[in-house]
Structure formats: C-alpha cells, structure tokens
Image (cartoon, grey):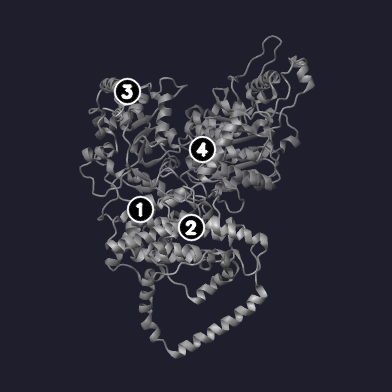
C-alpha cells in the first residue's frame, strides 16, 4: 500500500477512535501473557532447564510490531500525521508552531499579520515583483504595530534600500510631494496627533510585558525557527523563511510559509515574463494559477477552523495572496490572461489538484459525510439496521475495517461479490494490523495476520466419541492449542527471546465474495457480538427472476442479509439477548430505500422485538449526496449529453432542477467540461440576440462567480450549472428554456463518433488513460477489438532469443570490463517490441492516429521492460494474451484462469490496472460493481446496456474518475436511448428493489412463498 493511502487510513483510524472515545467505548488492549501455574503444570514445565527461564535483560520487541512502528515513523516523516480532533491537519499555522502565550492586544491573529509583514513580505519582494504597499489605516487594522512593540526588539535590523533605489524613489516621489495641498498636510498632522494620543493611552492600559522565559522562547522562534541561524553551518537549509527560496519546501512547514513559497514562484514568473516580454509556457501559467488557488483554499480552511469569528479580510497573508491572484488573472504575466472557458475545457487535470494539492492530500484529512453518518448510526444503542447510500468513490468501503475501533470485542463479517473489493478490505486490515480470514466454499482460511500454521477449517462431522465441530469452533480450538504450544516453547527460552514465537490470533474480520458462505458463517458466530457489513447488496438483482433458481447471486445475497433477521427462529434467545447490539450495515450507491424492502425491515424489527413506534431509532437511512469529481456523459455522436437536453418547457426544467440535487449519480454529469458546453450555448444565444433580459439581470456571470479561483472546484461547478438552469426556468418562457437546453448540433463534439474498434486505433488520442469496456463476453470482445494489433505482434520466441543474445553479450562485456577499468557501464538490455505497438504511447499515436489534433491532451505511457516481459511470459495464458498484455491490453474474464481457485491472470490484470500499466481492459458485469481502478473512460455498449438495469449502468459509470486515481472521466454510450434511461428515470432502481423483496419473502417463508 502506498505511503499516502496508508496514512489516510491511519487518519481515518484516529477519527474512529475519537468517535468511540466520545461515545464511552474503551480501547481493548492485548494484555501481556502471564505464566499461569496451572497451565505450566499441564504443559509439563514445572521443572525448567537451569538458567533457561531467567530474566536476562529487557524483552526483545516483537519483530512484526517493530516493523510496523518503523513503517509508521517513515510514513509520518514522509507525509505527516493527523493528531488533532477539531482541525484534521498535520500542518500547523505559524502561531501554533510558535507556542507563545497570547493575551490582550498580542493576539494570534495580529501575530500572524505582523510576521507576514516583517518577515515574509520582504522575502517575497526579493523577486523584484512588488506587493501593494499598506496604508497607515491598514497597518492599524492588522494590529501590526501592537505586536511590533512586543517582539520588534528581537528582530534583526531591517535592510536599507540601495542608494540607487533611494535616489530613484526620491525622484519619483518628489513631484507628488510638491503637489500636496497644505490643507491636506494639516489634516494629516491632526490625524497623527490624535493617533499618537490614543496610542499613548493604549500603551499604558494594554502594554504587554514578556517574562524571562517568554523572551527566551521568542529569541529561539525568531533566530532559529524563522531565520535558521542555528543551522548556518549545516548543508541543509533551515529556517522557515529561508525555505521559501527553495525549489521544494517540506510539507510540514507552517501554512503561511507554504503559501509564501507558491506566491514567490508566481511573482518570479511575473518578473521573468515582464523581462522577456512574453510568457515562455502557457501551461506553466495555468498550473501556477491553480497552485495559488489551492494554497489560498487550504489556508482559508485553516483560518476558518482556528479563527471562526474572523473573516478572510482580517488576515494579511490572505489579502496579499488574493491581490496577487487578481492581478495574475488580469494579465500581470505578460502574454497571458486567465481564460475561464479555455480552462474549463482543457484544465481538468489541474482542477483535479495542482502539485500543491497533491502534496497535501494526506496532511489535511476530512472524512466524507457518509463515513460520519455511518459511524454515528452504528454507534447508537441497541440493534441497528443501517442503509448507507452514497455515490461511488465517497469512502463507504474504506470504513469497513475501521468499524472495529467502535466495537473492540466484536467480530465483523464482510460480504461483497466483487473480489477486488474484498481484497482491498483485506489489504487495509493488514496495514492496520487487524487479523482477518477469508471464507469461500464453507471453508475458513486465516491470513498470516492471524499467525502461521493455522491451516484451513471446515465443518467436521462426529467421529466416534468426538462430537461434531463447526469450522469456527475448529479454528478457535486450533488458535488456543497453538498458543499453548507457543507458551511451552517460549518458557524454555530466555525472557528476551520469548516474543520470537508467533502469537496466534482469532480473526476479527471474515472476508468473502462467496455470498452462500456468509449465511453459513453467520450462524456459527455469536449474534450479539457480530457486525454484518454487506457491500453492493443489489448486485445481481438487475434481472427480475421467474423462478428462484433463475438468479443464484441475488438469491444468495438476500440469504446473507436475511440470516441475522431469521436467526431468532434458529437460536432460542431470551428477550434480553434479543435486544443486544447486533449491527447490520448495507452499503451501495444504488441501494433501494428501506421503504422498498418491507420484508427485510419488518423481519429485523420482529427479530429484535422492536415496536413500530421505535423503528426510526433502529432502522436508519444514511444518505449522502456528496460528490467528488464527475464524469462527462457522451452519446454516440461524441457530443456532451445532459439530463436537461430533452426539456421542452420551463416547468419541466424547474422540476428537473429540484430533482437533481437529490440524485447525485445523475448530477455528476455536470463536470467542468460540461459547464464549458453550457457557457458556449449561452454565448451562442447571446450572439443571436435570444437571451431574455430577465436572465441577464438575474444570472451571475462566470467571471464574477469564480473571481476567486480557490472557489472553482467540482462542487461549485455543479452548483453553478444548477443556478444557470434554475435561472432559465425562472423566466417561465418555454421557447427560451427549450432553446437553452437543446443540444448544439453545429458545434464541435468533445469526442469522435462512437466506433468501438477505432477506440484502440484511430480515435485512441481522444481517450487517454485506461479505457474500461464491459461486456457479457469480455474475452471475445477484446480479441475482436484488437484484431489489427494482433496481426502486427512479433513471436514471443523471437523476443526471448533476442534477450538471450543480449544476455550473452553482457556476460562477454563484463569479462572485458574487469580487465579495462576505464570502460563505461554496459548499456541496459532493450526489449525487441516495437513502441508503436504499445497502446497510448507517443509512437503508437503517431502511427495509428493520423487525425489527432495538435495539442491533444495525452497521458504518457511507459514502455514495457525486459523484466516485465519475463513476468508476463510466466502468466498461464496463451501467446496472444501475453503479447496483448505487453501492448497494454487485457481482459478480466475468469475463463482465462486455468485454475479458478488460483486466478493468476485476472489478478495480474487487476494489479496492472491499479499500477496504470494497461490502456484498455474488457471485463464482465461483476467487475463494474465496486472496483476501484484508475479508469478515465468507461464504454457502455449496446450489448451491455440491453441486459443491465439503470442501477447497473450507474454503478459502471461510477468506475470512471475515481478520487485520487484519475484527473478526469467520461462515459461513452453507444445508444442515445440508454442515456435517456438514466436521465429520465428517477425510479430506475425499481428492478433491484422488486428482485430483492421477492427473494426476501421467499427466504422468510422457507421457500414456500414465491
């Protein structure tokens, strides 16, 4: 797991632990084993060899714990750690780092402004690009003089201007001074006298005196922490202000200096462009605009946390940054002026996060709303049935392993039919040190996190005098047995070596994609200390069955969900036990509402004897419409498709605007590129004179709406798109509404016309990144799409022969090198595989995409290496698929795995996707649910849409533009009617609800009612 992702989960763990602490949950710590005399007698260790059990110093730390701690320290140093409950940031503001005692007029806010004025501003002006000078009123407003009186004596003397600069300044100011009116001078003198009198009074009343300890603290702050005088003789740069000049600034440097670092780069770009009379690189200009916007956005959030009663205007760092941003946008960089429309069309990769934002992805942590809602719901007393409904990519699955922080003595069962999702939860559990086991085919397989040598466990029938034993009982027995044997071994060792023997732990999480095994396992666990989490419960329910056996996946999923509800009929529990804290969480973006599943909900209420009056206290719907980035939806023509494109009347548009905010899966179609299309439509109507006067008066211009670029993000873009459409609807003019919403067929389309075979070839330039194609027959689909490519592939034997020849030459060169020390390093081996066969590489695009427009956005593809070829050659598939893998194509189809119990090839495909080593993948329907892969493009073909419900298609679209994995996303539809099904059907999830309810009734009746 990458360090950043690992740190995010540690931050999430802190969040859950604090919620648990607030709820009164005590942390359960593993106590150190003590030597029990009875156990010693049983083990036959009453008499130990002389000297073996004696204490010979401190005990050695468990190697696993030591490795984990070392990894945590490395991650902390690399990406920071979040430790605060209120403001989830590992980077502090400068007043927090100073740790000074603020009081009276010496406040944290005034200290921040003073430090910026006295330290940062002079540093920034070394770039020869100036910041606006502050008037006396502004200096008073920011309380700079108040702090100067307290800390000024500790500051180094201010540098005097050069004589040349002084002469120039005097000459420039001479005329202005001569023109001043005497009356104005007199008024100024009067004002100064009044200010002086008020300051004298203030000094006597609010004078701040530092004690000896505080003086030493201030000296250390200014000399060492700010100016780095203690590190003058060191090779590394020290002192916060000195880091502003560096190319890279450490991510844990206080926020104000992080902002100054970005501002300095922007001011340097201003000066360079002014000197050369043009901007060298327009891309660098827009990148700097976004970096500055992100820095302003981050520091705004920090100030709002720490100074909730203050506004942005009260802070000098923000004022200077906003002033710089304004002039930067308006053309202070010669040859460049910020074009909002161009930026929306071409800046998706920057809006996804500048270098500054990516750098602070883990230093600032904020849980998603759905994560907070689920935490609060499951912590409520008594049994809880939680419906967690939120768009894809909002961290629903990420909370699974962390739920155990809320219930230290519980076991969690996680079921999801999508194998990649199950494996990702296992990876998270492993990084958090939680013991887990896999369950498949009614067989439990503990992971190494439980300890080695635990084997697999199944139900065992009675044999002779030995009673029958369930798989869970067998596993518990094995854990206890091996721990006793471990104790016997460790007691024979010296004390400092005792931890070297593996401790066996019973799993706290059971993971499975085999839904049929989930119900079997749940019946074996203590229902009062078990949490059930089912991810993607509607999976498989998109086809309504005529007979129970028609849909085995949906049948097994509902059996899993109904098992906790029907357990009371199998286990004769007392009323008290029935009221125990049994928690069930169902989570999906397309999960039906509780009202649509009455059998499931009523069975839960009956199982735990909950009266109908208390239903809302135990059946909770946690719904969040929070979205991250969106995905552009395009029809077969290549034009952007909108939910409003078929609106005929103003009233219809009004109803749509009211519905969309509560329908996030459709709302996410309004992305930055989609907004650009709306703005172009606005311009076209304005040019034709068709805009209504009322619309012009009411609407906020985009330049005004986004005058502060820190407010330009995915949420504000969607909000502004809704504001535009609402404003159109308010005109109550059907013709105007239809004209505004009607798609423009004359303009240029965003993508080429739909052609599945050309997506890999002639049109590949339009789909950079990973393209995911879902189909009922993924293997056959990939072979069909790549026919032209397969005809160009070399034979694998020729590549192997060339590698062997290079290896032989390398051995000969090595012998000569030993004799000739002056000889240069031998060149690395090259793979004899033409670069123009590697999909999405620059050479590939030159050969296969003759119509590629100039300046088209590309995502560089790294060419395969010799080592990668050797790894691919070991995959258990035929040569065609090995060469396709080398070219960057694959298929997630179980038919390609020679051993279904060991899916080597499909697992390789999934790992290669996450590592951005594949450009095109075909996959079955199961892969479209819950998979977290860096797909930029998803293709909705006719064959896929015909057999898939609206919920299934929305889940598939959710695979595009995943948070932190891609910068943009698009869903390409082969048919317009499939787009209309998504846009025009607010109750499009009814197929899943009907299927799930039918199977719930069937299971409750024990197969009698159908």
User: Quick one: label 2 or label 4, which is nearer the N terminus?
Assistant: 2
User: Quick one: label 3 or label 2, which is nearer the N terminus?
Assistant: 2
- Please tell me which residue lies in front, 810 or 543: 810
Which residue is at the far top?
464
Alpha carbons under labels 1 and 3: distance apart: 53 Å
Which residue is at the far bottom?
183
Q: Which residue is identified by label 1?
A: 347
Q: Quadrant of residue 700?
A: bottom left
Q: Are marks 4 and 3 in contact (CB under 8 Å)?
A: no
From the top left corner, tell me how far across and down residue 57 is, in percent: 70, 28
Q: Is residue 228 left or right of residue 906?
A: right
User: Quick one: label 4 or label 3, which is nearer the N terminus?
Assistant: 4
Q: Quadrant of residue 482?
A: top right
Which residue is at the far left?
850
Q: Is residue 752 left or right of residue 68?
A: left
Say which mark, if any, is on residue 536.
4
Q: In the structure shown, which secondary structural element does the residue marked by tag 4 occupy?
A: loop
Q: Which residue is identified by label 3?
A: 818
Say which mark, if any, is on residue 241.
2
User: Quick one: label 1 or label 3, which is nearer the N terminus?
Assistant: 1
Alpha carbons under labels 4 and 3: distance apart: 62 Å
């Amino acid at each position: 797991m990458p360090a950043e992702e690992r740190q995010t989960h540690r931050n999430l763990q802190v969040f859950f632990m604090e919620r648990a602490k607030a709820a009164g949950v005590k942390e359960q710590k593993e106590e150190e084993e003590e030597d029990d005399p009875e156990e010693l007698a049983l083990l036959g260790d009453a008499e130990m060899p002389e000297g073996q059990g004696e204490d010979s110093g401190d005990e050695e730390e468990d190697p696993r714990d030591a490795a984990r701690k070392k990894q945590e320290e490395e991650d902390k140093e690399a990406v920071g750690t979040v430790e605060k409950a209120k403001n989830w940031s590992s980077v502090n503001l400068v007043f927090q780092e100073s740790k000074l005692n603020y009081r009276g007029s010496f406040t944290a806010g005034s200290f921040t402004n003073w430090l910026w004025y006295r330290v940062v501003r002079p540093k920034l002006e070394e770039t020869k690009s100036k910041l606006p000078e502050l008037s006396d009123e502004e200096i008073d407003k920011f309380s700079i003089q108040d702090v100067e009186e307290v800390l000024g004596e500790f500051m180094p003397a201010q540098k005097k201007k050069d004589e040349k600069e002084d002469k120039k300044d005097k000459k420039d100011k001479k005329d202005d001074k001569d023109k001043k009116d005497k009356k104005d001078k007199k008024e100024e003198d009067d004002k100064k006298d009044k200010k002086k009198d008020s300051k004298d009074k203030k000094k006597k009343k609010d004078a701040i005196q530092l004690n000896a300890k505080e003086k030493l603290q201030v000296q250390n702050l200014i000399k060492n922490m700010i100016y780095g005088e203690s590190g003058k003789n060191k090779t590394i740069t020290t002192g916060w202000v000195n880091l502003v000049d560096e190319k890279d600034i450490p991510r844990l440097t206080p926020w104000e200096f992080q902002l100054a670092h970005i501002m300095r780069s922007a001011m340097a770009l201003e000066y360079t462009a002014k000197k050369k009379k043009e901007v060298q690189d327009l891309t660098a200009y827009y990148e700097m605009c976004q970096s500055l916007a992100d820095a302003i956005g981050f520091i705004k959030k920090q100030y709002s946390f720490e100074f909730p009663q203050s506004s942005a205007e009260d802070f000098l760092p923000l004022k200077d940054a906003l002033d710089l941003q304004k002039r930067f946008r308006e053309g202070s960089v010669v040859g460049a002026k910020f074009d909002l429309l161009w930026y929306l069309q071409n800046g998706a990769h920057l809006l996804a996060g500048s270098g500054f934002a990516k750098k602070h992805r883990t230093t600032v942590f904020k849980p998603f709303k759905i994560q907070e809602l689920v935490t609060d719901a499951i912590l409520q007393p008594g049994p809880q049935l939680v419906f967690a409904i939120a768009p894809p990519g909002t961290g629903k699955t990420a909370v699974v392993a962390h739920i155990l922080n809320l219930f230290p003595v519980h076991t969690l069962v996680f079921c999801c039919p999508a194998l990649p999702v199950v494996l990702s939860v296992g990876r998270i559990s492993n990084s958090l040190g939680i013991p887990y086991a896999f369950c498949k085919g009614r067989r439990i397989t503990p992971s190494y996190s439980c300890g080695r040598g635990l084997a697999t466990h199944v139900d065992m029938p009675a044999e002779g005098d030995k009673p029958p034993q369930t798989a869970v009982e067998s596993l518990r027995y094995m854990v206890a047995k091996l721990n006793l044997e471990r104790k016997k071994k460790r007691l024979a060792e010296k004390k400092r070596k005792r931890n070297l023997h593996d401790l066996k732990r019973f799993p706290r999480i059971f993971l499975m994609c085999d839904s049929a095994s989930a119900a079997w396992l749940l019946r074996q666990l203590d229902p009062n200390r078990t949490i059930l989490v089912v991810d993607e419960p509607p999976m498989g329910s998109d086809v309504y069955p005529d007979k129970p056996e028609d849909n085995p996946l949906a049948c097994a999923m509902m059996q899993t969900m109904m098992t906790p509800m029907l357990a009371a009929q199998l286990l004769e529990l007392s009323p008290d036990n029935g009221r125990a804290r049994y928690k069930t969480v169902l989570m999906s973006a397309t999960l039906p509402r509780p009202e649509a599943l009455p059998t499931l909900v009523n069975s839960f209420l009956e199982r735990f004897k909950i009266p109908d009056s208390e239903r809302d206290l135990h059946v909770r719907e946690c719904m969040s419409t929070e979205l991250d980035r969106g995905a552009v939806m395009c029809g077969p023509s290549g034009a952007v498709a909108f939910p409003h494109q078929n609106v005929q009347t103003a009233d219809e548009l009004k109803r749509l605007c009211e519905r969309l905010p509560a329908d996030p899966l459709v709302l996410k179609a309004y992305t930055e590129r989609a907004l650009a299309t709306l703005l172009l439509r606005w311009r076209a109507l304005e040019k034709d004179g068709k805009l209504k006067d009322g619309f012009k008066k009411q609407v906020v211009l985009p330049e005004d709406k986004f005058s502060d670029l820190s407010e330009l993000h995915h949420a504000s873009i969607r909000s502004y798109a809704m504001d535009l459409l609402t404003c159109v609807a308010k005109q109550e003019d059907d013709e105007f509404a239809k004209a505004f919403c009607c798609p423009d067929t004359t303009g240029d389309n965003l993508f080429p016309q739909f052609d599945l075979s050309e997506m890999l070839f002639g049109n590949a330039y339009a789909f950079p990144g990973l393209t995911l194609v879902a189909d009922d027959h993924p293997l056959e689909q990939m072979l069909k799409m790549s026919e032209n490519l397969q005809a160009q592939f070399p034979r694998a034997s020729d590549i192997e022969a060339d590698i062997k020849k290079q290896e032989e030459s390398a051995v000969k060169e090595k012998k000569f090198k030993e004799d000739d020390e002056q000889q240069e390093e031998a060149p690395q081996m090259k793979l004899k595989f033409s670069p123009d066969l590697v999909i999405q590489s620059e050479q590939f695009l030159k050969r296969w995409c003759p119509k590629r427009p100039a300046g088209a956005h590309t995502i560089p593809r790294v060419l395969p290496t010799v080592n990668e070829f050797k790894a691919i050659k070991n995959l258990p598939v035929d040569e065609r698929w090995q060469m396709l893998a080398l070219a960057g194509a694959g298929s997630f189809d179980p038919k390609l795995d020679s051993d279904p119990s060991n899916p080597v090839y499909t697992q390789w495909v999934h790992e290669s996707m996450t590592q951005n080593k594949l450009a095109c993948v075909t996959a079955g329907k199961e892969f479209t649910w819950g998979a977290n892969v860096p797909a930029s493009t998803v293709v909705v073909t006719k064959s896929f849409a015909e057999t898939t419900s609206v919920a299934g298609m929305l889940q598939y679209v959710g695979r595009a533009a995943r948070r932190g994995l891609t910068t943009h996303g698009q869903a390409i539809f082969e048919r317009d009617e499939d787009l209309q099904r998504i846009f025009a059907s607010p109750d499009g999830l009814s197929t899943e609800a009907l299927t799930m309810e039918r199977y719930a009734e069937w299971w409750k009746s024990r197969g009698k009612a159908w």
